[in-house]
Amino acid sequence: METIALLFCSLLFGGMTLYSFGFAAFVFSALPPELSGQTIRQAFPHFYIFVFLTSVISAVLFYFLDPIAAAVMAIIAVVTVPTRQILMPAINLASDNGAKQKFKILHSLSVLITLSQIIGCGYVLARFV
């Protein structure tokens, strides 16, 4: 069970890192602004579902192995829900309305949340080294 838990946590760590620093950056550099924004907007809901599901599975698998690891993964899952359901639509609305300062603040918050989740996942992995 430990191996499967670590594989799911690793999948989350790698997936979030690749999406945040690879895919998103690539989309914005490869596509014109009007297409890149639409593409990212369509991709993010799926990203958050991936984060939620892999962190929940990891939390359940870690539950009997390491309660701290399970708690960290559960926190990642719980934080993902309002990020997807509240913060992401607010970011899109700010962008649609041309509210640049509000967009900047909300987007910065989403980046901080994602980085915190990646760090949390890395912490869990490091507990088993």
Image (cartoon, rainbow, N blue to C red):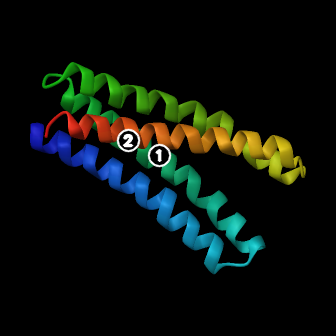
In this orientation, does residue 1 appear? no
Which quadrant does the N terminus fall into?
top left
In this orientation, does residue 40 appear? yes
Amino acid type at circle 2 is Leu
Which residue does the numbered mark 2 point to in the structure image? 53
Which quadrant does the C terminus fall into?
top left
Horizontal placement of 10 versus 80: left or right?
left
Horizontal and vertical percent position of residue 110? 61, 41
Horizontal and vertical percent position of residue 93? 81, 46
67 vs 109, nearest the viewer: 109
Horizontal and vertical percent position of residue 101? 84, 44
Q: Is residue 84 above or below residue 18?
A: above
62 vs 123, nearest the viewer: 123
- Which label sits on residue 61? none
Residue density around tag 2, few if under 14, some if 14–19, many if 20 or more, within 10 Å: some
Residue density around tag 1, few if under 14, some if 14–19, many if 20 or more, within 10 Å: some
Q: Is residue 114 above or below residue 35?
A: above
Q: Residue shown at 41%/26% (left/top)?
A: 75
Q: Residue shown at 49%/61% (left/top)?
A: 21
Horizontal and vertical percent position of residue 102? 82, 40
Q: For the residues marked 1 and 2, what is the alpha-carbon distance in whole angstroms? A: 6 Å
Task: Kindly indicate the quadrant of the structure image that contains residue 112.
Answer: top right
Task: Kindly indicate the quadrant of the structure image that contains residue 25.
Answer: bottom right
Q: Residue shown at 56%/64% (left/top)?
A: 24
Q: Is residue 67 above or below residue 111?
A: above
- The answer to the question of whether label 1 and label 2 lie on touching residues, with beta carbons closer than 8 A, is yes
Horizontal placement of 69 versus 75: left or right?
left
Amino acid type at circle 1 is Ile
Which residue does the numbered mark 1 point to in the structure image? 49
Judging from the image, what secondary structure is the residue with disc 1 in? helix
